[in-house]
Image (cartoon, coloured by chain):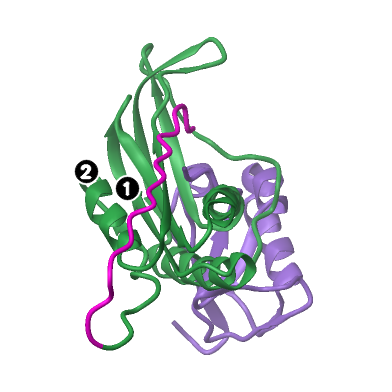
Chain colours: A purple, B green
Amino acid sequence: MDRCSISILLFAGLAESVGHREVSLAWPGGTAAELRTQLQQHFPAAAPLLARSAIAVGERYCRDDETVPPDADVAVIPPVSGG
Amino acid sequence: MVEAAMLQVSGERVAQAGGPAPRCPAPQLVDGPLDVEGLRRSGHRHGRAVVVFVGTTRRKTGDVITEQLEYEAHRPLAVACLRRLQEEAVERFSLEGCGVVHRLGVVEVGEESVAVVAASQHRPAAFAATAWLMDRLKACVPIWKREHAADGAASWVHGEERPGP
């Protein structure tokens, strides 16, 4: 992966909708909200579910205005249904 | 997807031996049957009132008959979220300890999928804490279920709320 791309883990119905459990995007850095928007543009079929999904970096959820650096360990978390 | 709750209250006091034991056992995501008895015993090490909640998978959701469920998780994030919930529950309800075990992978209908224990010096706090832990788990811990219906259809369950801390 080059410096300006990011690898993103997907789960459950989101992975099913996109067709992959992990995707790579060109990403020079930006906010979590911008990353979500970019994913929606790349995967329009998953856009509604992405709109309800959180961005996580490492072991915590990000606020929408938080910066996600290019080398971050990122996952997109759709609405959960444990229990 | 929790159909039945088995609530258990005990006034048994168990002396702690040696130094201070960990208040909360590490949360567990397991690929086989839950060790509910082990979780209950972990509560008894700490509190006079121990409440255990056990959730089992449900066969019928609306008109849909579910044959089997399948759970997946973002494991590192789920464990970290559960740890934070345990810490917050201890603080919020003045618990002596609490624990959570959740099953992943294929779970047959009627089997146990989640268990929570809360140990306190007082019964109301232990009851309230188990309810709070389950509510928070279902709102923010990155675990998902996929329902396999009798007609062969399978679908992931996603609510409307964006998860968050």
Near-viewer residue (B115 or A10): B115
As displayed, is residue B70 above or below residue B116?
A: above
Callout 2, which amino acid?
Pro
Q: Position of residue B116 (x, y in %)?
A: 42, 51
Report the predominant secondary structure element of the magenta stretch: loop
Q: Residue at x 53, y 89 (%)?
A: A3
**Dots 1, 2 in contact, CB < 8 A:** yes
Give the tally of numbered discs.
2
- The answer to whether residue B16 is magenta is yes
Q: Residue at x 54, y 48 (%)?
A: B127
Highlighted range, magenta: B1-18
How packed mark 2 is, by other alpha carbons closer than 10 Å (few <14, some 14-19, many 20 or more), is: some
Q: Position of residue A79 (x, y in %)?
A: 61, 48
The mark found on residue B118 in the picture is: none
The quadrant where residue B41 appears: bottom left
Q: Residue at x 54, y 10 (%)?
A: B63
In the picture as drawn, the residue positioned furthest to the right comes out as: A65
Judging by the rendered image, the residue that carries numbered circle 1 is B103
Q: In the rendered image, is residue A22 in sight? A: yes
